[in-house]
Amino acid sequence: MGRRRKRVPSGDGVLPSPRKEEKAPAPPRKEKKKKTDIGKVFINISIGLCIFSLIWFFYALYMRSSLARRVMTLHPSPRVLDANSSSPAVSPERYWGSYRPQVYFGMKTRSPRSVVTGLMWMRQFTDMDGNLRHTCEQGDHLQGYGWVMHDGVSFGVQEIHDRDFTLTTEFVKRMGGDHGGDWTWRITAKQHSIASSAPVISLMFYAATDIQGSLQAHVEEKNRLSSVTGTSEELGNFKITFGKPTAGEGAGGKYARYNFLQTRSPGLDKLTDIVKNSLNHKFVFSPPKGEKRSYFAVDSYKVTNHQNQQKDPKMESDFVVHQVTVQTPFQIEVLFESGSFRERPNQLVGSVLTDELEKRKMAFDEKFEGTFGLQAKGFTSSQIEFAKAALSNMLGGLGYFFGQSVVQSVYNEHPVLYPEGPLFTAVPSRSFFPRGFLWDEGFHQLLLNKWDSQLTQGVIAHWLDLINVEGWIPREQILDDEARSKVPSEFIVQHNENANPPTLFLALQELLEKLDAQPESLSSQTMLPFLRRLYPRLQIWFEWFNTTQAGPIANSYRWRGRDKDTNLFLNPKTLTSGLDDYPRASHPSADERHVDLYCWMTLASGIMANVARILGEPHQVYENTHRTLNNNDLLNELHWSENLHTFSDYGNHTQAVSLQQEKVFVPPGQPRHQFPVSRLVRSVRRAPKLQYVNALGYVSLFPFLLHILTPDSAKMEHILRDIRDPERLWTPYGLRSLSRADPLYMKRNTEHDAPYWRGPIWININYLAVRALHHYGSIEGPYKEKAATLYQELRTNLINNVYKQYLDTGYIWEQYSDSTGRGQGSHPFTGWSALTVLIMAEEY
């Protein structure tokens, strides 16, 4: 009851007691507490957001740093080649070689810091100043140079035709010891019949270390360097002996003057400069029956300019030069002897060297005929000599490089260095492109695989061992200072979104066909372990292409890396496609579809399925991809232009473009030279739209070139018609790269860029065309007879023209004029232009 009365207030209106009045403000106190709690919540939330933001910031930094590192992180799978695969213990017969394609004559080992040897020369008593020859230069204007015989392993013979004399450089290797054995050079000089007098020539033989190792000069008769002894980590102890000049084998000695230079070099790219800076005109050439004349020679007492500027002596290397000045004709031998070769039967000089050379030449001739059968096909001896030179120049153009590419991704603010690594590869041109190019190399190996399939396995392995964790391979390998000295700065940095045609799949296709045809051969027995090690890298490479180069719609593909500056280019280049200035969509965009890349991916998916099947790996995904891409209905849907009756790219395009002189406004009374120079800039007369790119040329042929078209495809009729039409692709010298009827045919791309893939004849694509005609002319289909006829005509035209230009000019060329057939571009170009040998041999 009492509790009940306390809880129920009285109804007489009596005011609450003072104690109750004091309790009245309680509700506001509760509101204040709530406000305090909300404030704390806001503070806590703010702190949490700050912490979260910091975590996210550092995570983003970490991720960006991680993504930035990916471009320079090699793939984690075991390397295809063991670290010592090129060592003399594992591969002694390939340890020493002419692996310096950028110089006229030189040798080195397949090791990271090799001792290098080489030859420089100059003609004395001539009006021409600065005629020192060393690195292969088109500006030297030699009448011709190149290997006429080279087996890729043990010997080589090269002819160098200077203005009024010819140098023949020969070398032979002999196995023995633990460091790749001995070798000998023989240099023979003969004057040309048209020379008014016998030239006096200075030959400069040299040896140089590359940071590690040492050389010691041994001098006799005051200035004659008789020998050089040395030691290095890779070679142990060795000796190089310089013979005296003679009039020929067995003949007596000749009057000669000798000079030498022993100094230090800051790098192999500086050797020419050091020799030039050391030349002195104070020495006298005074033969017994001739006048005394001053000649240029290296001065062993002169301090070269670089020595005063060198900052890090530890990075310098020994450099020794032996100069002999003598009148033609003469012959000189240089002997290298390995200190670990203890039981050599005799020295590899004189008649011993001559006998060895003859044996190697006979073996080369026998192997060449057994491989290519040109004599059996009725070719003349002169044509066969040409074919031998083409093959030998590719073999003699093999180089061993070691160093780091300069690369960059979108996550790198500045270019970074790729991991150090080796590359054993052929080069396109010793003078202009003396380094590795990814898409060229697949074509090179089509020829080299016929000669030596184990060599091809080694080269492919070197390239795939360069792949990074993303599946990207830098398309141009510029690995050291020597290589970088030949490349314009804007082309040195390699970007990881940029591809290059995966032509190594063409070489793999050849290896797989050989494995299938000759399973018991020695090369086939090494194939399965090779494929097993290669496979993880092929997988990531294919996946990189399939994702980074994907097109705007399913099963389409687009080259990345097109030139973005549409103001200066008539048609922005697509260097990544390998076809540079070949016309693509006039306005680059993400809507493009490129038919050549589609075809490369069709080929690659088929090879991947085949390799996976051979290795017992899951292959269904690759087979499904290949089945989809190989479907001609899909190909037609994506790339066949019904209006143009050809396969085409698709993109944002207009034909109404031209280069016009830029108008520069100069206010009246102002001097013109204070304003920018007028340039050629692109004028667009009609807005672009999404459509097929109406360019007929090499790109249009890719479904045919890579055998994707079925033999009964109605599209074959249009392709064969375009091939044979002189107003489009046909010439008496080969297929031109762009139709004569195309608006961009032989048009400059900028005021500085002459047409490159806009008309000239290229042998690599013509090889694919001949191969495709042979393929479709050999299988049943409605176009079999027509393809077979075109095959014979095109094959004959190509062989005749490349051979004729070689006779006329002394060179095999980068490309050939579609109007005259004349060789043009860089030379010698015995990269893919040497595929002429396979066309002659009908080896496809």
Image: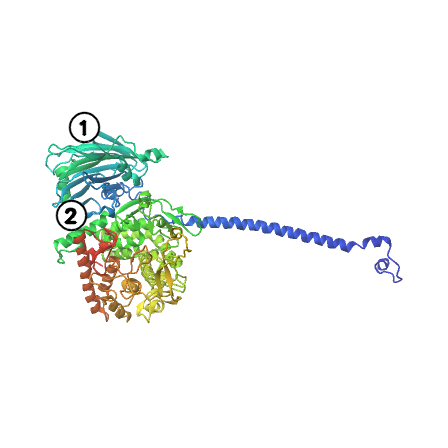
Query: For this rendering, which residue is in front, 69 or 813?
Result: 813
Query: Which image quarter: residue 321?
Result: top left
How dense is the environment of label 2, judged by Cα within 10 Å: few (below 14), some, or many (20 and up)? few
Residue 272 location (% of width, % of height): 27, 39
> Tag 1: residue type?
Glu
**What secondary structure is marked by label 2?**
helix
- Image coordinates of residue 803 in percent, x first then y, are 17, 55
The front one of 14 and 284 is 284
**Residue that badge 1 annotates:** 221
Badge nearest the viewer, 2 or 1: 1
In front of the other: 578 or 604: 578
Circle number at residue 363: 2
Q: x, y percentage for residue 670?
A: 41, 53
The residue type indicated by label 2 comes to Ala
Residue 504, given in percent of the width and then of the height, sits at 30, 55
Is residue 112 visible from the viewing direction of this image? yes
Asked where in the image residue 549 lies, by quadrant, the reply is bottom left
Q: Earlier in the sequence, mark 2 or mark 1?
A: 1
Mark 2 → mark 1, Cα distance in angstroms: 41 Å
Q: Is residue 67 left or right of residue 614?
A: right
Dot 1 falls on a residue whose secondary structure is loop
Q: Is residue 734 left or right of residue 673?
A: left
Q: In percent of the image, x 41 and y 54: which residue is there? A: 669
